[in-house]
Image (spheres, rainbow, N blue to C red):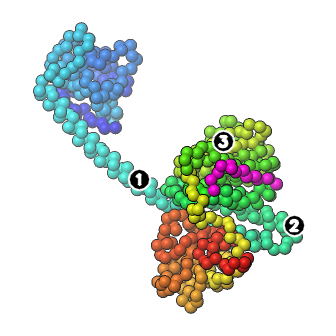
């Protein structure tokens, strides 16, 4: 708030009155002191002056003059001998905030009985009008100075906030990378172990390991998703996708968790659902996975139903409902307003759920709202349990449209290809090698960017899988040098990293990489990569 001192006001107005928040007069300019005497200091404003315009209810316990800023005040002393007119500005005196009445003589005396009189500039002399202009100009100058100072302060605060946000994002990126690197080895080895002949006890242990590692990966993903959403709002990446396949893929991802708790997860699709849609399928899958994960977490029995229904159709635009209902303990009515807030979590009585980050539903809300949709929850109309849902509007595509990298369909194919896997982590190299060899590929393994450059120069590869963060020569520099050396004969180089945001992938492509694969990776994920970047395997080779 702009504040001036009584001395500044006196440069332009002869009569200046300072009033504190208790209505007491704490300052009188010299002309007023000469007229009224110093004994008026400490008295209440309404005991010394009558306010004529605007009209004020005299029964008010407290008169707040700051409420009359921007209005022209007409008032007089209680004797009726001194008429004044002026305006109120915020002020300061002796280190205190006060209201300042900057006034000049009331040259045209108004009859109190003229109730509806509206003052005009012609009622005042030209010198008085000039005084108003001078005060206006001075106040404007003070405001501009303060505005410039405020702008500088805000700019500094913004820069500091951006620096802090950048530091936080860098920290989250490094931490999640360090977590994803060992998770790649853990989840990969578990997936390989599941395919081995195991006795029943060991099979149960492997199942528990998978459930635990999947949960840990889910937590890491939630923290990273939350950080990205807060930093950039997460831009939309529209592509053509098969809604039935995408939802089924999301459900299949969490089936192992449901199996451990002996929960049945069912899918229901509206027959009117288009075969192909345009939309951000990754956000839709993330939102659905969060709702399904939440249902599994808080359920110890019964069925979980995942429903996709058409709520409204307008030409080729479809408003779709994605709903997950469970038979868990439900949500107390008092807790429902908090469900989609950050870090809110509450243990549900009678369940054995794992701990929650309190981010899943918040992230779901952010994702859905980024797509122009809405989220909600209501208790089931029959029995126990809850129904969590979100609605979004998507555009249908012709059935002849080309799918944009729909995943999960290439796990059984075999590829006669030679690949180079580059990673400084021994376990990750071994996992990738075992998975790729099961897909029919021949694999060379190296542990550094320097080795990758040498191997790529000495051998011909169909594809290079390149880790990014490595000592000495990182994956970006190695890929750049390989591409410069090989020229048009360079094979596809795929970034293999825990950091695969849109910005990260743009950076990978800028140095000549063809795409990116997020750690940790599954055999289906590797198969999808091979399907996308290598020629199709010969017919019948499965």
CA separation in Å, label 3 and label 2: 40 Å
Task: Find the magenta span and give its range.
Answer: 262-275
SS for tag 2? Answer: helix
Which numbered tag is attached to residue 291? Answer: none
Viewer-proximal residue among 529 and 433? 529
261 part of magenta stretch: no
Pointer 3 or 1: first along the chain: 1
Q: Assess disc 3: are there few (<14), some (14-19) or many (≥20) residues with their C-alpha within 10 Å of its C-alpha.
A: some
Q: Is residue 371 visible?
A: yes
Give residue 62's position: percent from left, percent from top.
39, 20
Residue that mark 1 sits on: 158
Of 379 and 80, nearer the camera is 379
Compared across the picture, whether 85 is left or right of 431 comes to left
Answer with mark 2 or mark 1, whichever residue precedes in sequence. 1
**Seen from this angle, which residue lies furthest right?**
200
**What residue is disc 3 on?**
377
Looking at the rendered image, the disc whose residue lies closer to the viewer, 2 or 1, is 2
Q: Find disc 2 in the rendering and name its residue.
A: 201
Going from N to C along the chain, the mark reached first, 3 or 2, is 2
Please name the residue shown 14% across and 31% down the image: 130
Residue at the spot 72% in from the left edge and 72% down from the top edge: 412
Residue lying furthest left: 126
Task: Please give left or right for residue 416 compared with residue 476 in the image.
Answer: right
Local packing at callout 2 (Cα closer than 10 Å; few below 14, some 14-19, many 20+) is few
Q: Quadrant of residue 332?
A: top right
Q: Residue furthest top?
A: 113
Do residues under tags 2 and 1 come within 8 Å of each other at their CB atoms?
A: no
């Amino acid at each position: 708030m702009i504040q001036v001192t009584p001395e500044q006001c006196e440069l332009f107005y002869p009569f200046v009155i300072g009033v504190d928040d208790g209505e007491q007069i704490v300052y009188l300019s010299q002309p007023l002191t000469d007229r009224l005497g110093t004994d008026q200091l400490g008295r209440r404003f309404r005991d010394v002056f009558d306010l004529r315009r605007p009209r004020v209810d005299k029964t008010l316990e407290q008169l707040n003059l700051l409420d009359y800023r921007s209005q022209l005040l007409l008032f007089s002393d209680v004797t009726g001998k001194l008429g004044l007119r002026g305006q109120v500005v915020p002020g300061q005196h002796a280190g205190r905030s006060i209201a300042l009445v900057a006034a000049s003589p009331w040259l045209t005396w108004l009859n109190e009985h003229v109730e509806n009189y509206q003052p005009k500039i012609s009622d005042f002399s030209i010198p008085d009008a000039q005084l108003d202009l001078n005060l206006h100009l001075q106040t404007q100058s003070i405001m501009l100075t303060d505005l410039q100072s405020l702008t500088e302060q805000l700019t500094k605060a913004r820069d500091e906030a951006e620096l802090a946000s950048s530091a936080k994002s860098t920290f989250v990126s490094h931490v999640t990378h360090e977590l994803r690197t060992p998770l790649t080895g853990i989840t990969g080895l578990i997936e390989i172990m599941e395919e081995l002949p195991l006795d029943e006890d060991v099979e149960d242990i492997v199942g528990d390991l998978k459930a635990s590692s999947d949960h840990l990966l889910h937590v890491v993903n939630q923290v990273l998703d939350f950080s990205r959403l807060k930093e950039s709002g997460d831009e939309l990446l529209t592509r053509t996708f098969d809604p039935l396949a995408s939802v089924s893929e999301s459900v299949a991802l969490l089936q192992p968790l449901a199996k451990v708790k002996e929960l049945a997860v069912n899918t229901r699709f509206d027959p009117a659902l288009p075969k192909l849609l345009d939309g951000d399928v990754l956000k839709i899958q993330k939102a659905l996975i969060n709702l399904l994960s939440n249902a599994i977490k808080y359920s110890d029995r019964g069925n979980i139903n995942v429903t996709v229904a058409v709520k409204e159709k307008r030409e080729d635009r479809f408003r779709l409902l994605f709903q997950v209902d469970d038979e868990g303990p439900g949500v107390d009515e008092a807790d429902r307003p908090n469900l989609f807030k950050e870090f809110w979590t509450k243990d549900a009585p009678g369940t054995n759920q794992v701990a929650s980050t309190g981010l899943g539903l918040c992230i779901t809300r952010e994702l859905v709202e980024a797509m122009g949709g809405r989220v909600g929850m209501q208790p089931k109309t029959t029995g126990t349990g809850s129904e969590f849902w979100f609605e979004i509007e998507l555009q249908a595509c012709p059935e002849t449209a080309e799918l944009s990298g729909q995943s999960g369909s290439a796990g059984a194919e075999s590829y006669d290809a030679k690949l180079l896997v580059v990673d400084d982590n021994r376990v990750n190299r071994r996992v990738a090698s075992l998975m790729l060899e099961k897909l029919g590929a021949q694999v060379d393994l190296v542990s550094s960017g320097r080795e990758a450059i040498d191997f790529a120069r000495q051998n011909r590869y169909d594809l290079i899988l390149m880790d990014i963060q490595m000592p000495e020569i990182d994956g970006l520099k190695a890929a750049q040098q390989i591409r410069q050396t090989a020229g048009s004969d360079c094979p596809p180089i795929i970034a293999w990293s825990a950091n695969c945001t849109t910005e990260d992938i743009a950076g990978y492509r800028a140095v000549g990489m063809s795409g990116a694969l997020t750690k940790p990776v599954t055999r289906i994920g590797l198969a999808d990569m091979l399907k996308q970047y290598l020629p199709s395997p010969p017919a019948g080779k499965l």
